[in-house]
């Protein structure tokens, strides 16, 4: 039986999938000790053809009709044969020690309720991009590792991009398929709190995000996050959840600025375009411009998240 | 056209959905259906005269003991569907369900549960991207189906666990040993939301029975059992 199952839920990312799967060919952990489970969430591209080229790996592929990330991850959980499960995003490439570092961390923390948060770095080609730099180092809307130290115990809000014991999920809760476009790990983490979930930070378990997000991508992502947070707060009407999700402030922001949001976001997108062009041309951005850019990025993403909160689907 | 036996026990003195299920299951286009229901009416004051009620029991008696009584001549049938009295079935359930069970060659099967259901095992929750999955687990209720090719493997129900607990960890060991398949139909989930389980019998007694059964019988662990083998979209 393998020690760890890496679960990759994917949809229409056949362009990056070869890079992701290729990284499992050079893992320091022996192939007999892991398996890779790809769950294809109803892709319409050539994902199924791409995965066939990796039959040298301990790889199993499952296909479902499009049902979203949460349903795909659930399929991966139940298809897995290992006591440890690692959820890997389909735009992240494993460092060669990723799997062994997760296994080692779980050996150090064998309690069923302890999950392990690894470290996600940006690929060197995109790390200095103004937008990617902002969302990982300044605004930290994407990753927020700044205040974490190795071995630090974290709460349920850090359950995403983590590994955990299969038994924790099978016995205490799986992802809610209603969270089809994100937020599923936050919601499950909250439920697993009752089972004593804690998350330990292990930066040696490293993966690398390959995909550069555009300004529009990130706005879209923030709207989705806002909708998911609204749903999360509706499902679990607890003051802690509502405070974490900033529902009230989101609703207030959107009510105040909705009328001007489209024009404002167009303006910031132009600003981002200027920054991107200069970055691509190797022209350094001066500090004053960067300060303005960071401020407007932050405001834009707050606004988009507020829009998502305001448009969050009411539960039946 | 197959001969299908449908068996169930309803709590006559409790709110139940048996009448709706009985009515719906009577309307098969594809099969000849025979229904046999037992009314459990320990207060002797319930509504115990639903159609197809073959017997009324007025003293508490375990469900699987009662079911064994109904299944004495099971060899005359092609499949048996066992159901509880607290499930809401999807429209035209029986014909659609049996078509899928035949298509995927499941000797033992169950429909998934809707998300609003009371559940004991997350594994049985509907997986919305799938039509069906081949599994190592089929639960003892609220609805399950035995094809005739599994009658000798599953029936009669093991009397050491008269409420059925633990049988669902013994069944996969037997089914797999015989080279047969079991699975869950996700396309036709049932709602099991009327009342919480365990309101009608003692948990301690039932757990003791289960532990004895598992100690004496070849079975899968929960970690082994809650495993999906193949997914069908």
Image (spheres, coloured by chain):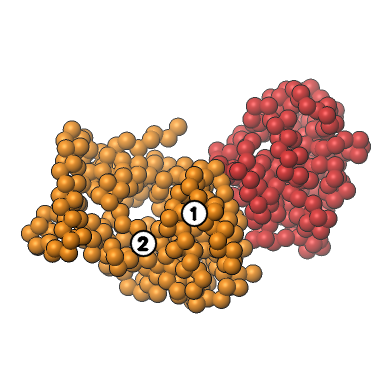
- Quadrant of image for the N terminus of chain A: bottom right
- Residue shown at 18%/33% (left/top)? A259
As measured in the structure, the alpha-carbon distance from the residue carrying label 1 to the one carrying label 2 is 16 Å
- Front one among B134 and B43: B134
A137 shown above or below A227: below
Residue at 44%, 52% (x, y): give it. A13
- SS class, disc 2: loop
Q: Chain letter of disc 1?
A: A
Query: Dividing the image into 4 quarters, which one contains the C terminus of chain A?
Result: top left
Residue B125 placed where, x, y %? 59, 45
Residue A95 horizontal side relative to residue A33, left or right: left
The hue of chain A in the figure is orange
Residue A105 % position (x, y): 47, 74
Q: Name the image quarter holding residue B224.
A: bottom right
Could you classify mark 2 by the number of other residues whose Cα lies within 10 Å: few (under 14), some (14-19), or many (20 or more)?
many
On the question of residue A222 being in view, the answer is: no
Sequence-earlier tag: 1 or 2: 1
Disc 1 or disc 2, which is closer to the eye? 2
Number of marks in the image?
Answer: 2
Q: Identify the colour of chain B in the image.
A: red
Query: Looking at the rendering, which quadrant does residue A233 occupy?
Result: top left
The answer to which of A81 and B6 lies nearer the viewer is A81
B66 and A46: which is toward the camera: A46
Q: Is residue A181 above or below residue A125?
A: above
Label 2 sits on residue: A210
Q: Which mark is residue B47?
A: none
Q: Which residue is mark 1?
A: A9
Q: Quadrant of residue B196?
A: top right
Give left or right: position of A303 versus B168: left
Q: Chain of mark 2?
A: A
């Amino acid at each position: 039986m393998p020690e760890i199952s890496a679960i990759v839920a994917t949809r229409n990312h056949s362009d990056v999938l070869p890079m992701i799967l290729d990284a499992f060919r050079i893992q320091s952990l022996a192939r007999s000790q892991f398996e890779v489970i790809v769950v294809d969430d109803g892709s319409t591209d050539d994902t199924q053809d791409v995965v066939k080229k990796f039959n040298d790996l301990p790889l199993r592929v499952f296909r479902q009709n499009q049902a979203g990330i949460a349903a795909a991850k659930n399929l991966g959980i139940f298809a897995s044969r290992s006591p440890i499960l690692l959820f890997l995003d389909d735009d992240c490439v494993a460092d060669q020690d990723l799997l062994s570092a997760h296994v080692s961390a779980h050996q150090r923390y064998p309690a069923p309720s302890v999950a392990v948060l690894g470290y996600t770095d940006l690929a060197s080609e995109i790390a200095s991009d103004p937008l990617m730099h902002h969302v990982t180092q300044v605004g930290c809307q994407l990753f927020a590792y700044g205040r974490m130290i190795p071995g630090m115990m974290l709460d349920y809000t850090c359950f995403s991009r983590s590994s955990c014991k299969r038994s924790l999920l099978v016995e205490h809760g799986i992802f809610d398929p209603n969270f089809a476009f994100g937020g599923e790990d936050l919601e499950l983490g909250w439920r697993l709190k009752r089972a004593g979930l804690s998350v330990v930070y292990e930066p040696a378990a490293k993966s690398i995000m390959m995909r550069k997000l555009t300004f529009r991508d990130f706005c879209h992502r923030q709207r989705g996050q806002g909708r998911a947070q609204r749903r999360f707060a509706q499902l679990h009407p607890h003051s802690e959840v509502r405070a974490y999700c900033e529902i009230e402030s989101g609703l207030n922001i959107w009510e105040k600025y909705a009328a001007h949001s489209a024009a404002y976001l167009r303006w910031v997108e132009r600003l981002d375009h200027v920054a991107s062009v200069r970055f691509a041309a190797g022209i350094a951005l001066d500090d004053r411009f960067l300060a303005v850019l960071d401020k407007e990025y932050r405001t834009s993403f707050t606004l988009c998240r507020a829009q998502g909160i305001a448009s969050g689907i009411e539960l039946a | 056209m197959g001969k299908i036996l449908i068996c169930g026990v309803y709590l006559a003195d409790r709110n139940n959905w048996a009448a709706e299920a009985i009515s719906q299951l009577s309307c098969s286009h594809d099969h000849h259906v025979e229904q046999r229901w037992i009314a459990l009416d320990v207060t002797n004051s319930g509504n115990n005269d639903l159609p197809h009620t073959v017997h009324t029991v007025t003293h508490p008696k375990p469900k699987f003991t009662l079911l064994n009584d109904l299944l004495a001549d099971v060899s005359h049938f092609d499949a048996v569907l066992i159901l509880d009295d607290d499930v809401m079935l999807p429209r035209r359930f029986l014909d659609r369900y049996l078509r899928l069970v035949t298509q995927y060659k499941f000797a033992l099967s169950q429909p998934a549960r809707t998300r609003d259901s009371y559940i004991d095992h997350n594994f049985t929750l509907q997986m919305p991207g799938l039509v069906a999955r081949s599994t190592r687990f089929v639960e003892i209720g609220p609805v399950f189906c035995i094809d005739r090719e599994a009658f000798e493997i599953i029936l009669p129900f093991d009397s050491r666990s008269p409420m059925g607990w633990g049988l669902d960890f013994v069944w996969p060991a037997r089914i797999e040993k015989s080279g047969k398949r079991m699975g869950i139909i996700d396309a036709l989930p049932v709602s099991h939301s009327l009342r919480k389980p365990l309101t009608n019998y003692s948990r301690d007694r039932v757990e003791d029975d289960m532990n004895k059964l598992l100690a004496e019988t070849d079975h899968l662990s929960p970690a082994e059992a809650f495993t999906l083998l193949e997914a069908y979209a």
